[in-house]
Amino acid sequence: MNDDVSRDPAVYVHIPFCETKCPYCDFNSFAVAGCDVDSYLDALSREMDARGVPKNPSTLFIGGGTPTVVEPAQLDRYLTDLLQRIDPDPEREFTVEANPGSLTREKVAVLKAHGVNRVSLGAQALQPHHLETLGRVHGVDDVKEALDFVREGGIPRTSLDFIYAIPGMTKREWVETLERAIEWDPGHLSCYALIFEPGTEFTLRRRQGSMRPIDEEDELFLFRWTERRLRAAGYRRYEISNFARPGQESQHNVNYWRNRSYAGYGAGAHSFMDGLRSANERRLDRYAQLVLRDGAAMVSSERLEAEAAARETVAMGLRMEEGVDLGEVGRAHGLDAPALFSAIAAPMAREGLVRIDPRLRLGRRGWRLADAIASEFL
């Protein structure tokens, strides 16, 4: 896995438009119909002008929303605008998120022309009724077609995102989904259990009693079976929900989990620069107003003290199979991290939730309880 710390911070750009707002999604996204995309891109350009962009970032990531939902000319515009500020490097991981149905051969050609070398496709499900439940506007066949477009267009790295534990999903349906995904042979798979996020339509339906989550034991079976099946197929779980063939890990996301610096641009984007965490305004109109007035749209920020930063580094690093080196954490933050965290880790190790070998990692029993374990270190 790439561990180049000599580069500048990673760069994230947020394109917040989608065909429709999915009922389970809590990302900062808006239905593109009725939105002034060009005005948003004007504000995005202004923000990058005013704040500056790292010249030699470790990775580039365009996320959303659906970055490919815009017209090809608009796609070309914002990629050109970003890349003119960055030193070229064909070896740099450059990811763009896309959804089946909005990705065309023409748009893939635009991505390829700008050096995009990784496309992450939001497939989510491979049964029509589950796509309908999730509010997705693409069909099952669109997933394979989009994957073919990317490969035929010469973009070498692909990732597919799927959701399991969808209300009403059977074990057999998830098995069928994963078997087909393996057959398509992407380099990377993200498999997320459905979460009822606060403020989403799904959470409202659950509260009203019109939607029920699947049984916890069934969800646990799917979680464990997914890891076993993908391991047998040559994919290694390197993070709780992410699996990759050797060398195909998402370097951009690894940067987040290692708690390293990144610069985010766009409505709702977050940054972590020089020890300062900050977040941009989420609303499109307000974001544009702030950027045009001030050159930036930061609405919140926090600078963590050494111990808090160390705790966060451990909590995030535990999401990964490689775990965390407590000695390295201590040196980075100027404290005795092994002493600080031993009282928390020791009883968990006795229960098989974590292990120390000498890195601190999740134990086999800990993977499914990772969020609760991480909260103990925070």
Image (cartoon, helix red, strand yellow):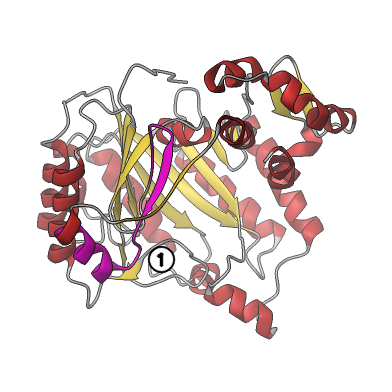
Per the image, label 1 sits on a secondary structure element best described as: loop
**Residue under the point 19% across and 34% down:** 115
**Residue under the point 56% across and 30% down:** 306
Image position of 339 (left or right of 66): right
Residue 118: x %, y % from top left: 33, 37
Determine which quarter of the picture holds residue 267: bottom left
Let me know if residue 290 is in the magenta part: yes
Please tell me whether residue 309 is drawn above or below residue 209 in the rendered image. above
Name the residue nearer the viewer: 260 or 35.
Answer: 260
Residue 23: x %, y % from top left: 49, 73
Let me know if residue 144 is in the magenta part: no
- The amino acid type of the residue labelled 1 equals Gly
Residue 369: x %, y % from top left: 75, 45
**Is residue 224 among the parts visible in the rendering?**
no
Name the residue nearer the viewer: 289 or 178.
Answer: 289
Please tell me whether residue 207 is drawn above or below residue 139 in the rendered image. below
**Is residue 285 among the parts visible in the rendering?**
yes
Determine which quarter of the picture holds residue 307: top right
Please tell me whether residue 154 is drawn above or below residue 338 in the rendered image. below
Residue holding disc 1: 139
**Residue under the point 16% across and 61% down:** 293
Image position of 83 (left or right of 168): left
Residue 173: x %, y % from top left: 63, 59
* Magenta part of the chain: 271-292
Name the residue nearer the viewer: 100 or 69.
Answer: 69
- The quarter of the image holding the C terminus is top right
Q: 10 Å neighbourhood of mark 1: few (<14), some, or many (≥20)?
A: some
